[in-house]
Image (spheres, rainbow, N blue to C red):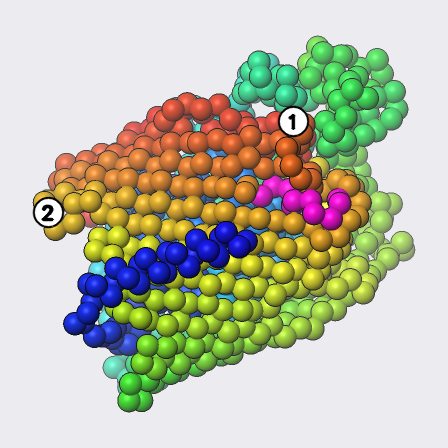
Amino acid sequence: MKKIILLFLIIITLSNTAQNKENKTKKVTDTIQKLDEVILKTNVIFGNKYVAQNRTGSAYFLSPKELKKFSFTDVNRALRSVPGVNIYEEDGFGLRPNISLRGTSPERSAKITIMEDGILIAPAPYSASSAYYFPTIARMQAVEVLKGSSQIQYGPFTTGGAINMISNQIPDSFGGSVKASYGSFNSSQLHAIIGDNNKAFGYSVEYLNYGSDGFKKLLNDKNTGFNKNDIVAKFRMNIFPNAAIKQSLEAKVQYSDEVSNETYLGLTDEDFGVDPFKRYAGSSNDLMKNIHKQILLTHTLDFSKNFRITTNAYSNYFTRNWYKADYITFNGDRQSIGKVFGNLTTFADYLGLVKGTINSDDDDDSINIRANNRTYRAKGVQTKLDYHWYKGDAFHDIEIGIRYHYDDEDRFQWIDDYTVNNGDLQLVNAGTPGSNANRISSAKAFASSITYRLKVNNWTFTPGIRYENIALKRENFGSNDSLRTGVNLSTRENNANIFIPGIGTNYKFTNNLSVFGGVHKGFSPPGNQEGQAPEESINYELGTRFNIKNLKAEAVVFYNDYSNLLGSDLAATGGSGSLDQFNAGEVLVNGLELLLNYDFLTNKSDYSLPFTLGYTHTNTEFKNSFGSDADLWGEVIAGDELPYISKHQFNIGVSLEHSKFELNLNGRFNGEFRTQAGRGIIPLNELVASNFIVDFSGKYHINKKVIVSANIINLLDETYVASRVPAGLRPGHPFGAYVGLQYMF
């Protein structure tokens, strides 16, 4: 950490020296009027890059232009340019991302606050936060990422950060587009949007379909791909448009469905070395089906240019059944697939059933496929009051937020048993619905926050505090009560009340150099086990933003001090899937984030040549020794590193842009990481090796309305391991080429 701080101070010194030479006769003239400047307006946090770069905490605005460069459908690829974001892939298409911000546990993105249009969007963010649903990046107009003290308004997870996905907004006038693409693995995308707006009424209607046959292969040639549909309609009415007090009411309706032939089964190291894209026979029936629906009403009341109240009422519904191999039974002994892959020598015969190289002698040898049938509901009302004013040279801004939220997860699951004969699966025992899991976990939460921002001369101060009151409950009806009569009902409850303070500050030396820093309390809700304490931490950051001619840069050091880290029992990481949380005690996470942007051809020609470099260094350390439940982290000894977090990662992007065309190259290095807690050299059976993946995109404007595009994923065709959990090695996306056509009107 001392080396990181020293590097940070050197950066500040060098940039300050350069800027002092350049600005000896210049006055710091940053105009506070720019704080009102907004590009995107509805249900956003800051709405453009200028506001993001002038916050008192670390923030990043992934702009419409950046998202359009590669026409992303994989959110992993979209977020890789943002420092502080740590991701490990799972399926190669980004269907269920695992995202960490500043070293939080990445599994199912369960430890960060995920929003769409300012609304919590994880299926059940309080009672079951694992994000088995994630908004489709291809229909987003922009993405906002907050870290540090910038995020305390956007709980419940305030340790690592928050991500707000901004969906395509209603246009200012009539227009739309139709975009289609096709390429490798029979992958295709169709995206159409149309909208209009006038003084009294506006609307937009959007349809997105994308899918693929998949790049993995089963011996029976079954499809290993997916297909997704996404429909969004928005309608806005300006109430009394000629009145002094402006009001608007916007309704958003969203529907999506997915059918994907995805599995938790990976490969052994030996089989991965021979053919990384094969899939075992035991996974041939694995299938995910899900449906997501959202209704969002947004009422905006503008009393004046300086005073606005925004109220949202929302309802989210998500149902899914991931039918997948979870257990293997051999000679009547049942073991989880995670345990089988964790000890291949002991469970060689079990693995033979999975591969299809061993036939079932009778019903005591079987593949046990669990119907992970779950329904999630989330609903709530939230109001945000924003009042700002100018007095002399000072700018004041007060933001007050209040939210009442309810969510639940309803598990009604069963297991079907299949015998294996020559690699074919045959159903021999159909399970009774509810016999595997039959329970409802729910949460009621009241949250409020108040933030005050004062900008005076070169200083900006942003103190704030958040309050969370959470009541968690689980009702377990038991495996023998499929009708839920309550005869065997057991319940447990837990509560959490907490204040979450934070303060950030920014000092601007010149128009081109500023330093910011902050400290805030980190929080993550506990589980519903009675008396379990929430996750808590104290988090610090210190950063600088500076411009030197055509170079724009940001460097941040962060230090997160956990007093009580919580781990979750997730099937996605080889656990039982109970979602019960357990205490991992004290943990330290610190690191460095660096972002550089430079244009080699600014003001020199009709071309531009922007270059971007992002780097993240992350250190993690357990401060306690313990054995984690279900062996999720293994036997932990104080000083061990956390699993699933790369120590080094960087992203390089370069583009050649002209009014008629653009060419984009992007390279991402993901450093190695371990899948069990440990230190030093990572054992091979716990290692996910580093990789460097390059993507390419190109566009040519035939005219103002027609664009031809080409994309290449994994240009260098590197074969790499994306993850090792929950059961075996899983490959990343191989070389794939795609062409597209877009018509705008």
Q: Secondary structure at mark 1?
A: helix
What residue did someone put label 2 on?
604
Q: Is residue 508 left or right of residue 603?
A: right
- Residue 336, image x and y in percent? 77, 32
Question: How far apart are the alpha carbons under marks 2 and 1?
Answer: 51 Å
Which residue lies most toward the left here?
605
Asked whether residue 171 is in view, the answer is: no
The one nearer the camera, 20 or 614, is: 20
Determine which quarter of the picture holds residue 73: top left
* Amino acid type, label 1: Leu
| Residue at x 61% of width, y 45% of height | 107
What range is drawn magenta here?
A: 636-645
Asked whether residue 635 is in view, the answer is: yes
Q: Is residue 600 left or right of residue 9?
A: left
Q: Secondary structure at mark 2?
A: loop
What residue did someone put label 1 on?
684
Q: Which mark is first along the chain, 1 or 2?
A: 2
Eyeballing the image, is 292 above or below 42? above
| Residue at x 29% of width, y 55% of height | 552
Which residue lies most toward the bottom here?
392
- Residue 55, image x and y in percent? 39, 68
- Residue 102, image x and y in percent? 53, 53
- Residue 731, image x and y in percent? 54, 27
| Residue at x 62% of width, y 16% of height | 271
| Residue at x 76% of width, y 12% of height | 358
Residues tagged 2 and 1 counted as in contact (Cβ below 8 A): no
Mark 1, other Cα within 10 Å: few <14 / some 14–19 / many ≥20: few
Mark identifier at residue 639: none
* Amino acid type, label 2: Lys
- 653 part of magenta stretch: no
- 641 part of magenta stretch: yes
Q: Is residue 256 left or right of residue 480?
A: left
